[in-house]
Image: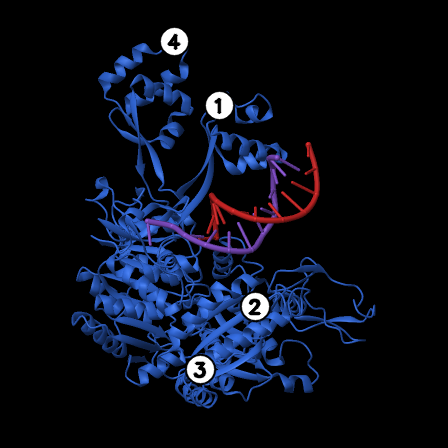
Chain colours: A blue, B red, C purple
Amino acid sequence: MIAEVIVDVSAYPIDRPFDYTVPNSMQSVVECGSRVKVPFGPRKVLGYITGLKDESDIDERKLKPIHELIDLEPILSEELLSLSKWLAKETLSYEVDALQVMLPAAMRAKYEKIVTVIHPERIDNGSFATFIGSRRQIPLKQVMDSGGGAFASLLKKYAAEGIVTVDTTITQKTKVKKVRMITIAELQTLEEVSKSIHANAKKQAELIAYMFEHAGESVEAAKLLNESAVQNPVLKALIEKGAAVETYVEAYREPDEIRLKDSPIPIELTDEQAIALRKITDASDEESPETFLLHGVTGSGKTEIYLRAIKHVLDKGKEAIVLVPEISLTPQMTVRFKERFGDLVAVMHSGLSAGEKYDEWRKIHRGEVKVVVGARSAIFAPFTNVGLIVLDEEHESTYKQEDTPRYHARDVAIWRAHYAHCPVILGSATPSLESYARASKGVYTLLTLTKRAKQQAMPTVNIVDMREELKEGNRSMFSVQLAEAIRERLEKKEQTVLFLNKRGFSSFVLCRDCGTVVQCPNCDISLTYHRSNEQLKCHYCGHEEPVPLTCPECNSEHIRFFGTGTQKAEEEIAKLFPEARVLRMDVDTTRQKGSHERLLRQFSEGQADILLGTQMIAKGLDFPNITLVGVLAADTTLHLADFRAAEKTFQLMTQVSGRAGRHDLLGEVFIQTYTPEHYAIYLAKTQQYEPFYQLEMAARKQYGYPPFYYITLIQFSHEDLLKVADYADKGTRFLKENLSKETFIIGPAAAAISRVNNRYRYQCLIKYKKEPKLTDTLQQLIKIYRTSWMKEGLLMTVDVDPSHIF
DNA sequence: AGCACGCCGACT
DNA sequence: GTCGGCGTGCTC
């Protein structure tokens, strides 16, 4: 028997299956989708079996046997194997990368070099012999790091003489957690052991006394040691004497339990909800792979529809996958799922450790859970009988992975739905233009919820023209109206959320004498001032430097900070409302694990009056006492050099506004802007999606962007400006020569931020309606890149359907 | 990618 | 003379 194996080597000529013979001992157990250890050239690597056959095209004598079978049960199903093939083709990535992205990081191979001492007696006395001592296996790294480098040459000599060997071991990154269990013997045995205990062994006597009380029971070792108050060696001694038996059993790491709180009992569905649910369950019953776009305003009860649709498929013995943008931000969401489905739910999010993720994955793989709620990668959940897939907040760009394989979870969801013959629900209050356009064309089925489920009124949205404020002489970042509204909430003990899409203190530092703006030495971008540690930071490469006292160009002392970030806003609030308690939430205050949850909990418990934050507070907040939302500068996202800028702004405004007055209290929203006439801003006032959609579609049509054209972005970067321009030009010319006349090829042009981390960046954009030669041409371009340009220090990336283009 | 093989300069 | 630099080529 011959196995086709994809090996764990990401390199151009290796990106295809290699044939191996299957040793007799493995014949009955090998299966597609299992991992194996195989010899590959002079070393051993991890591989994935993707096919089994009787004959190979390669000369049988050249074939090597599989060295070891790692999984007795396949870890990838037929479905996931064929999905990986499709994924690699669609995203133009290596097949191994497509396979590995489906598995928890813990299951990837860890290669470690180990020095094995074969003839310790032949090692000369000296520091090396002392270092080795009685050890026979030492990690190579340890040998190299010790002895001040002198061991390296010795090692080489001994290896040449065959006294030691250096081999690479392959282990999984994280192991299955094992818990040590102690099974205590029966009374009779204990009696006997008890007699043999020496009178001096007081601790052993104590332990045996404890054991008498628990004869025949199985206890966790940690618990036993704790309760009997003895040390491990004492236990060891008694085990030796036969008073107990120790075993290791597999266990799961339990992530911190989410505190369940009382939630309203599921209420009656509104008519709209009932109709939408009915259409979904019908599709499920007909096993139709229909994609639904569930368009519902904030608070219209989309989650309740998900829950009931999931219940429907669970009752039929099927499974459900629920994707949410970034789960740590929406503990309320997970709580609802746990309440409804209890232990049948696995949760996968970035807050879990590698081991915890691995455990959740195993629960799914073994069929112990039926629902998975998770971020993007949960779309690869190893279920075998998927009955429903939900993408909540469908428009979120986090569903697109930013590195290889650059897949979009929505596309994978639709692929799996076709494979499993089950429906997909894309839910959003502000659908992406692509999805809404597909729904309008009938590709997706549109389900609309126009009313809020609990009949709350929508918040009043006020647009504040900051140009007028400036004319009136108000140079602060708070308009008179917003300041007044904040003061009112402080008096009424209600909470305020302030949104500012810029972290740090000020966006740039400018010399008023010569006009110099302090730039990052590695990137083509101005540095941001962070007051907390008096540093200038680059938000692209992480460069930090102290704040200059004088202008670095002309030595003038007239340097000033311009623009406003969250840190400065925090200070201004303190000045304006000294009595207010403020919580700031941005990348800088939430870097620590769990700080997200902590800050949100503090706010929900009323420990602060104002929550000030960036992007990250736009989602998921749902606290009854928030009655005011202020957007300090709505324009920041609007002027990005990206065709989705208006869409992003509208979505953000709508989302942020939705934070106000979700419960009994009436909400009020203030959006401060310098461009109140822009449709993305003024339409956010009435929160009407349809008119926005129409205007934005007209703009997309005019400029030839999605959903009218598909786009693919090719980015080039190199340390040398001339070289990158040259390669970008070559690449673009290649595309022009090979793609059809109807396809537009824009560029090459310098990227919006033309240098990051000392690398110059160029890009080229392909726009097309129909381009049968696209995949082929891109494959060829990638081949040229990987076989020649890459060696010259060029980095090239191809992103089909990019989420942004700067 | 990683590793071996192979062919030329600076040291004991 | 050997040690070691990294160019070239292969991996079932």
B11 to the left or right of A492: right
The kind of secondary structure element at disc 4 is loop
Q: Nearer the viewer, mark 1 or mark 4?
A: 1
Q: Which mark is residue A120?
A: 1
Q: CA distance from mark 1 to mark 2?
A: 51 Å
Q: Nearer the viewer, mark 4 or mark 2?
A: 2
Q: Which residue is mark 2?
A: A717
Q: Are marks 2 and 3 on the same chain?
A: yes
Which chain is mark 4 on? A
B7 to the left or right of A290: right
N-terminal of the pair, mark 1 or mark 4, is 1
Q: CA distance from mark 2 to mark 3?
A: 21 Å
Can the viewer see residue A304 in this picture?
Answer: no
Asked if A41 appears above or below A240 in the picture, the reply is below
Quadrant containing the C terminus of chain A is: bottom right
Q: Position of residue A531 (x, y in %)?
A: 68, 62
Q: Nearer the viewer, mark 1 or mark 2?
A: 1
Q: Position of residue A664 (x, y in %)?
A: 41, 72
For the point 70% across and 59% down, the residue is: A545
Q: Residues within 10 Å of mark 4 (few under 14, many from 20)?
A: few
Q: Position of residue A92 (x, y in %)?
A: 40, 67
N-terminal of the pair, mark 4 or mark 2, is 4
Which chain is mark 2 on? A
Q: Are marks 4 and 3 on the same chain?
A: yes
Q: Which residue is mark 3?
A: A767
For the point 50% across and 53% down, the residue is: A593
Which chain is mark 3 on? A
Q: Position of residue A440 (x, y in %)?
A: 32, 85
